[in-house]
Image (spheres, rainbow, N blue to C red):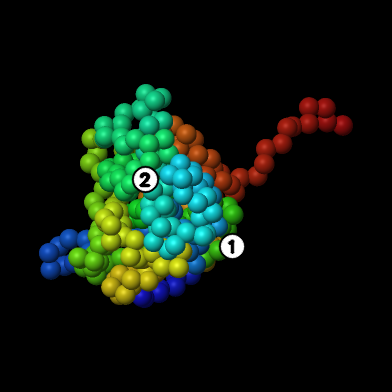
Amino acid sequence: MTTISLTTAEQFLEYLRPSANQWWDHFVDRPSHVFRGHADAAWKLIPKGWRPLDDNPHVSALMRAVAWSSKQVTELWSLRNEDQAIFWRFALSEAAIQFAQLGRNVGLEIPWEIQRSLITSPWDYVPYIDISLLALAQHHGVPTQLLDWSDDPLTAAFFAIGEDVHFEKDLCVWALKLSEVPRGDGLSVTLTTPPNIGNSNMRAQSGIFLAHAQGPHLNDVFVNGAWPSFESNEHIAKGLTKITLPGSERRKLQSLLIKEKRSEAHLMPSWDSVAKTLKKEWATSSLWSGAPALKRPDLNPR
């Protein structure tokens, strides 16, 4: 894995430009990398649904519910490694199923087949969940086994900004060379859902996913109660570049990215996102933030 440390937001932005030479396969004249942003450069490349149970209360709760409904032990830590992996996968399937069921119940368009709840109708195998449904759930914060990337490096830079709580942390953008993604061992880069199913976020973010296939072999990568991070795969590690930036440059980067049309309004289009983007622009732009505060004039001068 290669690490490149840059010191200013301007350098960071210039290095990540989509037209930069390092992001292209010039033999076929096609982009050669996908990108992911982390608000904390120390974070690993691991899907939200695969993070340790101590930091994953929603998955823990679903695992307990599925285990209880199938008359298995409710103490997850006492399960054998293979059984814990299976119940974990049941929990992620149940999360997607409940997301789709509630969405349909309130009148949202869900064009995919929705499986029965694993809690009310336990199954003896982990059901396959349509990748388009998983993508939609992932983009709305539901834990899944997908790790989302973008073929646009500046979109990844936007997601690296994070929140104010990350202000003192170095941020980073990961670049993954597609030719290094292994084939045939269960890893695959899965292209995003088509635009016509209503996933506007996915379309705006030029999304792409890295994920293990959902087959039975997946239990084999679960070791000592934990799923692996993607950078621990030796093939993927060879194709990774980690570009870091000091956290003190976060606000400057945010201001530059708004000018590049990489903001909440552009990447998660809704009226709420438009309002949030305007507020951030007012807070970061020198035109607005540098102006002195207005004071009421004294109407009764002495």
**Residue pictured at 59% horizontal, 54% vertical:** 165
User: Separation of disc 2 and disc 1 at Cα?
Assistant: 36 Å
Q: Nearer the viewer, residue 296 or 65?
A: 65
Q: Is residue 204 visible?
A: no
* Residue under pointer 1: 168
For residue 98, which quarter of the picture?
Answer: top left
Q: Residue furthest left?
A: 28
- Does 161 appear above or below 114? below
On screen, residue 2 above or below 157: below
Q: Is residue 168 visible?
A: yes
Q: Do callouts 2 and 1 mark residues in contact (Cβ within 8 Å)?
A: no
Report the quarter where the N terminus lies: bottom left
> Label 1's element?
loop
Label 1: how many Cα within 10 Å (few below 14, some 14–19, many 20+): some
Give the SS element for disc 2.
helix
Instruction: Indicate which disc, 2 or 1, sits on the residue closer to the N terminus.
Output: 2
- The residue nearer to you, when weighing 76 against 31, is 76
Tell me if 215 is positioned left or right of 41 in this view.
Answer: left
Mark 2 burial class by Cα count in 10 Å: few <14, some 14-19, many 20+:
many
Residue of label 2: 93
Residue 266 rendering spot, x and y as whole percentages: 38, 42
> Image check: 193 left or right of 169?
left
The C terminus sits in image quarter: top right
Q: Measuring from the top left, give residue 30's x and y in whole percent.
A: 17, 60
In the image, 17 versus 168, the foreground residue is 168
